[in-house]
């Protein structure tokens, strides 16, 4: 069965299972080689890149739907931080992609989508490929201008990044993106990748330590030519409180 036949066949099933006109598109950010990247699917039909989104079942809460969609479409499990950030509903945002199908196709109806973003360490996800896709890959944000994304998914990624930049001043960032043990320099590089600019080292170190979300370990990062830097981990109790209530100062 080719990709077009598969979509047609699944259309009738979708009408029975899912709510009409509502979808969810999660943006999953990862951090690697001092750069942010995003999880995307390359669809068999028309060979364009998509966010790992999907539809909401008729008897399903929206947040639960996003967790299920990520598991089924990309192999993302144990979602620990997932936040809604926007609604996208331009006319023909989804209809145009399915222009080769007739008007009865479930996927071709006008869909309003809810944008979510999540932060993940790429090494902790065993990526899978669903029946609609030929690949599921991490794509660096610097590569996005050179790839063709379907619908308005590039716009959704850009809005998610802007939201993440806004949140970074009031919420802690890093526990889902960095290894368990990290240096202050590695944490600074994460913040710089998100903000898209360099930060003053002294100011950053002072501010991040004042937040109280770090624990200094009695270990150093070995192997460099210079003095081995101290290693840190996040104080999960304080970190989680800051996620709920915001940071005391920044």
Image: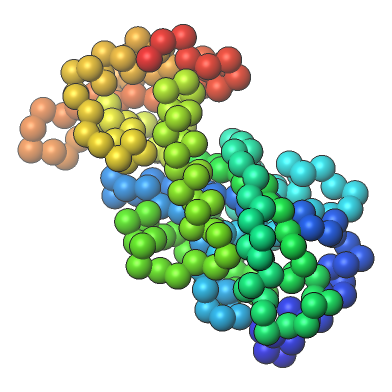
Name, please, the residue furthest toward the left: 225
The reply to whether residue 242 is visible in this rendering is yes
Relative to residue 94, is residue 218 depicted above or below? above
Percent coordinates x, y for residue 199 in the rendering: 23, 28
Residue under the image location 89 percent in, 53 percent down: 58
Quarter containing the C terminus: top left
Residue under the image location 33 percent in, 18 percent down: 208
Name, please, the residue furthest toward the front: 91
Quarter containing the N terminus: bottom right
Image quadrant in which you'd find residue 50: bottom right
Percent coordinates x, y for residue 248 in the rendering: 46, 9
The reply to whether residue 71 is visible in this rendering is no
Name, please, the residue furthest toward the bottom: 1
Tell which of 196 and 201 is nearer to you.
Answer: 196
Residue under the image location 65 percent in, 45 percent down: 87
Tell which of 79 and 220 is nearer to you.
Answer: 79
Number of numbered tags placed on the structure image = 0
Specify whether 231 is left or right of 248: left
Specify whether 34 is left or right of 98: left
Residue under the image location 66 percent in, 53 percent down: 89
Percent coordinates x, y for residue 10 in the rendering: 80, 75
Percent coordinates x, y for residue 214 in the rendering: 39, 18
Relative to residue 178, is residue 46 depicted above or below? below
- Colour convention: rainbow
Image quadrant in which you'd find residue 207: top left
Relative to residue 3, is residue 151 depicted above or below? above
Relative to residue 37, is residue 106 depicted above or below? below
Tell which of 102 and 238 is nearer to you.
Answer: 102
């Amino acid at each position: 069965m080719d990709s077009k036949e598969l979509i047609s066949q699944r259309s009738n099933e979708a009408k029975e299972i899912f709510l009409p006109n509502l979808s969810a598109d999660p943006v999953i950010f990862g951090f690697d080689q001092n750069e942010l990247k995003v999880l995307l699917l390359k669809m068999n039909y028309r060979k364009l890149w998509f966010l790992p989104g999907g539809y909401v079942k008729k008897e399903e809460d929206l947040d639960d739907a996003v967790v299920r969609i990520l598991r089924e479409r990309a192999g993302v499990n144990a979602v620990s931080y997932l936040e809604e950030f926007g609604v996208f509903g331009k006319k023909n945002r989804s209809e145009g992609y399915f222009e080769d199908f007739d008007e009865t196709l479930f996927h071709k109806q006008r869909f309003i989508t809810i944008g979510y973003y999540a932060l993940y360490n790429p090494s902790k996800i065993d990526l899978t490929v669903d029946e609609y896709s030929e690949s599921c890959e991490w794509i660096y944000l610097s590569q996005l201008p050179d790839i063709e994304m379907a619908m308005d998914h590039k716009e959704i990624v850009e809005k998610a990044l802007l939201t993440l930049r806004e949140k970074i001043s009031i919420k802690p960032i890093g526990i889902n993106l960095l290894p368990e043990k990290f240096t202050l320099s590695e944490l600074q590089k994460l913040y710089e990748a998100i903000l898209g600019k360099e930060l003053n080292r002294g100011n950053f170190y002072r501010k991040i330590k004042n937040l109280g979300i770090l624990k200094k370990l009695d270990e150093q990062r070995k192997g460099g030519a210079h003095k081995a830097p101290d290693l840190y981990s996040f104080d999960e109790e304080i970190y989680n409180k800051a996620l709920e209530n915001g940071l005391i100062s920044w």
